[in-house]
Image (cartoon, rainbow, N blue to C red):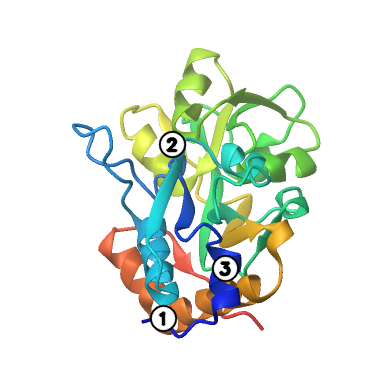
Amino acid sequence: MSTVPPETIATLAPHGVLRAAINLGNAVLAQPGNSTHADAAPTGITPEIAFRLGEELGVPVRLVPFNAAGLVAESAANDVWDVAFLGIDPQRAAHIAFTAPYLLIEGTYAVRKETPFVSVADVDQPGMRIAAARKSAYDLFLKRTLRHAELVYTDTSQAVVDLMLKEDLDAAAGIRQPLIAAVALHEDIQVLADQFMSIEQAMGMPLTRLGAGHRFLCDFVERAKFSGFVETTLQKYGARGATVAASAE
């Protein structure tokens, strides 16, 4: 039986079930369920963390899958999820109350080997066009920081390399691990060694539900890091290149 105060549970799971938004656009953190079963639940790091939270609260968990992070963020006020797993971003923070990050992943570029690019800074030049997933954490960051290059959009992170090839773009932005997997099929494409950002992956809840629930969620994330649960889950799913975030000060 859960020892969590009822008012905390009511804030985090007001409908008696913890609805966890799962972003399937980030393959490092979650993957679709068995393709032979239409109702199969997603698997991966974020579903594992969601079920761990549900156990502590003593409530059942329902995973709510989304194909892109932007769709999760846009639905924050629609009462379709209670907690979410997203990269921290100031624009999203206008509607979502984040915890400290539990995980860090790298945002970088895939480029053709024939290009002179050796660093991410080389890509931000006049006339350069970069494929990106609309409203992803790295898209929001690049829109604020790019000075010269232009972003060209696709709906999901999985499609950025294909868009780069189809539209003859100069680079594809994304998370390092999925980019490496995508370019493995193309001998003439490589992933740059450095990064343009460290994406802070955190849990969040609708900004309208601040209070005991958010304090508990922040504490839960810190305990999940300190206990080794996040690290163990990373190893279980082979999330290479991702690192557990430091404890919040």
Residue beneath disc 3: 10
Residue 26 screen position, x and y as percent: 46, 45
Please, what secondary structure does the residue beneath circle 1 have?
A: loop
- Dot in front, 3 or 2: 3
Marks 3 and 2, how far apart at CA: 48 Å
| Residue 226 visible from this viewpoint | yes
Q: Position of residue 41 (x, y in %)?
A: 30, 45
167 vs 219, nearest the viewer = 219
Which amino acid is tagged 2? Answer: Gln
Distance, label 3 to label 1, CA atoms, is 13 Å
Residue 2: assigned label: 1
Asked if residue 133 lies left or right of residue 20, the reply is: right
Marks 3,2: beta carbons within 8 A = no
**Comes first in the chain, label 2 or label 1:** 1
The circle drawn on residue 190 is: 2
Circle nearer the viewer, 2 or 1:
1
Q: CA distance from mark 2 to mark 1?
A: 49 Å
